[in-house]
Image: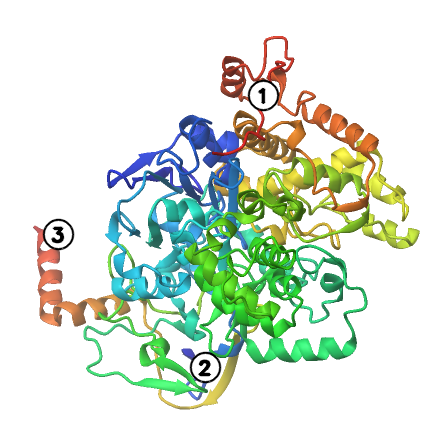
Amino acid sequence: MRYAETGFNLEIDLSRGSIERVATDPRLTELHLGGQGTAAKIQWDRVPPEVEPFSPDNLLIFSTGLLHGTPVPGANRTAVDTFSPQTNLYSHSLFGGFFGPELKHAGYDKIVIRGKASDLVYLWINNDKVEIRDAGHLQGKGALETGALIKEELKESDAQVAAIGLAGENRVYMATIEHANSSASRGVGVIMGDKRLKAIAVRGTKDINISRPAELFEISNPMYQAIYDNPHCGDVFLHEDDEEWHVNNFAWGNARERQKGFWNQEKEKAWTDITESVRLRWTACYNCPKDCHQAIKYPGRPTYFQKCYSKLTYAMAAYKELDFNYDILGVTQEYGLDGYSTPQVLAFGIELYEAGILTDEDLPGFPSDSGERFFYLVEKIVRREGIGDALANGVYWAARQIGKGAEEFDHNSTKKFEQLPLKLKMINYPYFLMYATGAKMTITQTEGSYPQSPIADKKEREAFVKNWDAAPERFKKWFLEWEPRTHPSIEESVHICDWNETMHYIDDAIGTCAFLSSFRGQFGGRPPYHLYNLPNFISHATGMDLDSDTLWEIGRRNRNLIRAHNVRRGLRRSDEKPPEDHWKIRDPEMETKLLDAYYEFKGWNNDGIPTRETLDELGLDYVSEDFLERGILTDSGATPSKETSAEKEKK
Amino acid sequence: MKGVVTVTDGLKKIVKEIKVDLDKCIGCRACEVACSAFHARPKYSSTNPARSRIRVVIDDLNDVYVPIRAGDYTPAECTGRHTYTISGKEYSECSFCGVSCPARDLFKEPDSGLPLKCDMCEDDPPISEPMCVQVCPHDALVYIEREEEGGEEQVQREEMEIGLEALAKKHGLQKIMDAVARMSMSKKG
């Protein structure tokens, strides 16, 4: 008997039109738990580095988390994993809502999609009945509109739908996958579009076996109130109308400048009024009492859902007011565009025009108002019309396609991927490591357990540490000793980066929301789920014998396996750096020391490649064998002199 | 939504009621999860919203979120339906209806198709309030008990009787009686 998981994946080949229900190996659950972890193993076995992201052999995997469909509140984030045409590296995204639990009730842990359909199709999974259906009539439809149309034509109002909009259909690199109140960002929609898969609809009514159900229910039930009452979890920022923190600390335009003094009481009143006039209600994801998503109805736009910092990203990139942001989201959400990277691409386009690199010839009839320019460029990008064809490939590639000095304006990407618009003064050691080495492409998917800044008052610090259940002992000592305006030591920085990222790898395998755990320790230190209570939930659900150390080791294993994917695709030390101007004051010597220490701590060689010992110890022998065969590692453990670099330009 | 009525001393009765505030519902469906867990046998052995006796009817693009609880079974669907507009939002009559009917797969056991009915989590010993209410900290669902004078006496019916009645409605009473007769004959034989 399999517990908490169904033990079956759905394998879809869109080229051949085949559908298979395939039993999975329970040993892989013990090694990787589920979600992104088990997806990475499937990809390792079946997607060698020679496979281009737009090849039919690239896989697009939708994974439920191990705890989806159990009574554990807040386990609802579906992982989407593939390889990205933007970075040629591992591409990982997550979306909340209801999809993962529904898929598990339909009897599947994952949907593994390979091949490409000849015409636009959608997938309809209704328990044991699975069909690939024509989606010609849905071409060009909005992402959420598509969901509504599919539910209507199937006469299944309970079905859960994940769909792409026009951006995904046209293989825009910033394309999302949209579902209910949630979006999978960081560019996974481009592969769904490349596979000509417009949507997946799923309905499931089966039971999921739980190993110790009464015990699991007993510890899950009090979590509703605990999560609801906890002021440090959920989307704390979105619930505040005081936007001072975001507007003062994040950079405006194409990640250019901070506008200190922009915020005042008058502004707060005006912006609060705007939000209240367009918000229909706060909504939640499956089985979670936190309401982190705003349902928005802006005049003249269809209803959409706004989450997280996308409330401000377009407004700040265009130097506009909040109502502009709500207005343009009404368009971009339906096109299925990432609210983080897209505004930067648009602001970058405007900068190129103002610098004379793009001209009226490239942008016929380009308006003078920055807001109108944003709308103009969005239409070009989602259709890949004219200059939109280059901009649709994101800042890094667009800069190189356009040339004429456009490369100089690509100043905020790492590993070819747009980063959050943050421009700060003094280098921050743990953050340097997280930016440089993070495999999840944005800082929000790496940071989150250790506080961002120290507490000045010693008494308050002691009080903070006293009930810091989430933290391993060593961090309590370090935090107590952390004085304002001082850097954590190299050793501390390495450990902070390690803890932060490990918690994300755990969340992304079991499907719990980062807003309840991995992202939410850094403010307040009281995440409802952490290293020390999660083993209990997982053990009761699965019957696996699991403690905090084992859980940590699984997080490490998944981190290393995904690292290995990227190494195999050419990632090396030279690629691991934050945007050049992320901090005004850098410290190259210290940065070298930090990276050296981090690699050593992780059991990676000086070029950032996991050593044979590290891999074998984690049970990833097949990875070390592959590395030896490919000459990525040698028997002596040294890196061969000939470097296969990720800098190799894409044709 | 009204619930179970318990007659205390022939003169007074306790009406159990769940007040639903649609404006407070965030659409998380925790009520469905908790309900299905409570009614699973053995208790808490599974959570499956398809077996829940409360469902949140969601039409998110129209901002419709309506938790409804399973009522009685009916063999025939309504001949006509109302569409209500409340504060500018359109609701189908079905959005408020808890009847297990042929028009939809709500409130039917997914395996057998047998109707599900809310029992307000009657239990021995009794629990403080129905499970759906317990897991709704937003107070979209609030439980109240009211004491009412007199009124019609209603006797609580066993689960088997409710199931039998549903079967009788579906197949006709005569068929059920024939089946019972056959079963008892074969037992004797």
Q: Quadrant of residue A507?
A: top right
Alpha carbon distance from label 3 to label 2: 42 Å
Gap in angstroms between the C-alphas marked 2 and 1: 64 Å
Q: Residue furthest top?
A: A636
Please state which of residues A453 and A116 is positioned toward the viewer in this rendering: A116
The local crowd at label 1, few if under 14, some if 14 to 19, many if 20 or more residues have their Cα within 10 Å, is many
Nearest the eye: A535 or A503 = A503
From this viewpoint, is residue B30 visible? no
Viewer-nearest of labels 1 and 3?
1
- Work out whether A462 lies above or below A586: below
Q: Viewer-nearest of labels 2 and 1?
A: 1
Which image quadrant for residue A639? top right
Count neighbours of disc 2 (C-alpha within 10 A) and say few if under 14, some if 14 to 19, many if 20 or more: some
Q: Position of residue A512 (x, y in %)?
A: 55, 49
The reply to whether dot 1 and dot 3 touch (C-beta < 8 Å) is no
Q: Secondary structure at mark 2?
A: strand
Rendered image: mark on residue A615? 1
User: In this figure, which residue is indicated by the disc labeled 3?
Assistant: B187
